[in-house]
Amino acid sequence: MNIHEYQAKELFEKFGVASPNGQVAGTAEEAEAVARAIIENGEGKQLVIKAQVHAGGRGKGTFKNGFQGGVHLIETPEKAAEYAEKMIGQTLVTKQTGEEGKLVSKVMIAEAVDIERELYLAILMDRETCRPVIVASTEGGMDIEEVAESTPDKIVRQFIHPLAGLQAYEVRKLIKALELVGDQAKQFGKLIKNLYALFLKCDCSMVEINPLVVTPEGDILALDAKFGFDDNALYRHPDIVAYRDTDEEDPREVEASKFDLNYIGLDGNIACLVNGAGLAMATMDIIKHCGGDPANFLDVGGGATKEQVSAAFKIILGDPNVKGILVNIFGGIMQCDIIAEGILAAAKETGLSIPLIVRLEGTNVAQGRELIANSDLDVITAESLNDAAEKAVAAVSA
Amino acid sequence: MSILVDENTKVLVQGITGGFGGKHAQLSLDYGTQIVAGVTPGKGGQIFGQKTPVFDTCEEAAKETGATVSAIFVPPPFAADAILEAVDAELDLVVCITEGIPVADMMRVKEIMRGSKTRLIGPNCPGIVTPGLGEDSHGGCRIGIAPGYIHKRGNVGVVSRSGTLTYEAVYQLTELGYGQSTCVGIGGDPINGTSHLDVLKMFNEDPETEAIIMIGEIGGNAEAEAARWAKENCSKPIAGFIAGATAPPGRRMGHAGAIVGGEEDTAEAKKAILAECGIAVSETPSDMGKTLVGML
């Protein structure tokens, strides 16, 4: 799950991670009021107005109404209102959004910050060591992958004991690596402790601050942040679930999530409906191997109900690219007869008019195959996975 | 011989009174597995099915019945605690089927388990099967959720992160006339108790296992680590398959651990490493059995 910049800032404020003064606005009037308040409390700094979308490259993006740039420097509340008017309710296209762009429904207005140094700071869950790791570098503001490639010695990693937590000496090592002294060292010490607390308390899989800036006045501020959350832990974080913005997601994936289906949309024309994540991936792979293109990843899970299978069919058929469907079920937890009933019900309900290839194996397979054989629907049955993939590719090329 | 479990293994089921746990406990009993106890806090004294006693704690269940292995079917918010309870009861093996345990919970479990005598398999796994000698492999030890009847007692060891791909490989082997010593699903989560490498080492030591199928997927470096070890140390033929060649980068493909994070953990990179280490890589999931048989 991704969150907006203004939501990341809210989390930072809640946990005491310093970031520039700023607030979110949903209308031009709000933008003007927010800008006025920041100017009145501020120190005569410039402001910046930023369109809120889950995509990078906002500064160089273009709105579909012709307005250039999703990030602007402004000086007056009136300008904030004028720019907010041009951004809110409009669609921003950046190099990361694709042609269709993203609808902007909020803008953030914040103090523009002068920068003396740009640092990099992140906390991740490391799967190799099964520990959180703090990654820090003096080379902030650029792509960390590039830094890792060109100057790997400028990246330090501090692994944290999961039960003991962050230790004072570990903080001192990071301060040394980031070449911070005096009051800045103190500020950083507070920031990293609070950031680590945030990481644990919110069940993050990743928090990345890039850049973490040192201002000419000597303040250390988180200028931009990226968050990742552990989906498995969202049940205990209703406040973070509330940050979800379904306007930012593929509508097919949003629909699938309502039925607890694991769906990821792709560009091909052969839809797959599979039980088990490994087999679902392997089914996509074998379609490709046989010369076809998968339209999606779809794992209906271990205990799918008839309703879920029906919903899965509707989502698949909602994709206009889909020219055929391959159902591949190896029943362990799932019973083939239940899947067969679901497939038949869904095919009837949706008035299926494209080829449907079904391969069933596992628990209650005989009953499942019988149900399909006795139905009046035109279903292509397959014996093996390879057979199913070949038949699917042939059916969509016919 | 086999690894981890055999027909004499006594198993307790944590979460036996839940719908999911109960259903699979019964299927294991029907398969001939010695499910000797259930554990559900607050339901001690009940009887599951015909005669399986339910206890309030793992400790009591193990003491009263001699169970040495636990299967966990407890919902995600309580699963980490259930694992630690089984560790505290000093069981030899804990097989956690539960999917969806928070990563932070597993991180703590893993740390607390360091140095304990208990081995953890999973979580988010299909479990273990050591097939029996009866019809449709009846009489074996089935812990978890695999369909028992597709197995056949024999000499191939199977290890996989994915449940359904394990069944696929087992089914292919059985159809080709090759039985299995033990099939181990290590689970699809980023933090798990037992790795591909751990299982390869056990198969290498096991006299009954003569060949191995290792199934992996995108994300992490566990398959590469196992392959590099096998190149130097494993005397038995291994066939491999890696799922996720068509997965878009950065997306989590169902399994919490199945995400391409960098160049090294793509399907192509892993397949190349496996091949370099002398493992016969199956091009499609349909050919896993054939690929192994081709090496024998």
Image (cartoon, coloured by chain):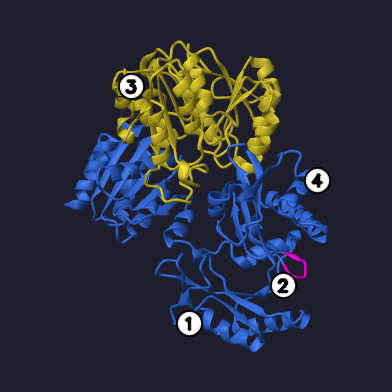
Chain colours: A blue, B yellow
Which of pointers 2 and 4 lies earlier in the amino acid sequence? 2
User: Of marks 1 and 2, which one's residue comes earlier in the chain?
Assistant: 2
Q: Is residue A361 left or right of residue B60?
A: left
Q: Tag 4 or tag 1, which sits nearer the N-term?
A: 1
Callout 2 secondary element: loop
Mark 2 belongs to which amino acid? Answer: Asn
Q: Please tell me whether mark 3 or mark 1 is closer to you in this view.
A: 1
Label 2 CA crowd tier, 10 Å (few <14, some 14–19, many 20+): some
Tag in front: 2 or 3: 2
The residues bearing labels 3 and 4 have C-alpha atoms spaced at a distance of 57 Å
In this rendering, the label closer to the viewer, 3 or 4: 4
Residue located farthest toward the bottom when viewing the structure as drawn: A78
Type of amino acid under label 1: Phe
Quarter of image, res A131: top right
Tell me which segment is drawn in magenta: A215-220
B171 left or right of B19? Answer: left
Which part of the image, by quadrant, shows the C terminus of chain B? top left
* C-alpha span from label 2 to label 4: 29 Å
Chain under numbered label 1 = A
> The residue marked by circle 3 belongs to what chain?
B
Q: Picture quarter containing residue A15? A: bottom right
**Which residue shows up at 61% across the image and 18% down it?**
B68
Disc number for residue B174: 3
Disc 4 residue type (three-letter): Ala
Which-is-in-front pick, marks 1 and 4?
4
Any mark on residue A168, and which? Answer: 4
Residue A67 numbered mark, or none? 1
Q: Secondary structure at mark 4?
A: helix
Q: Is residue B104 above or below residue A256?
A: above
What is the quadrant of residue B43 in the picture? Answer: top right
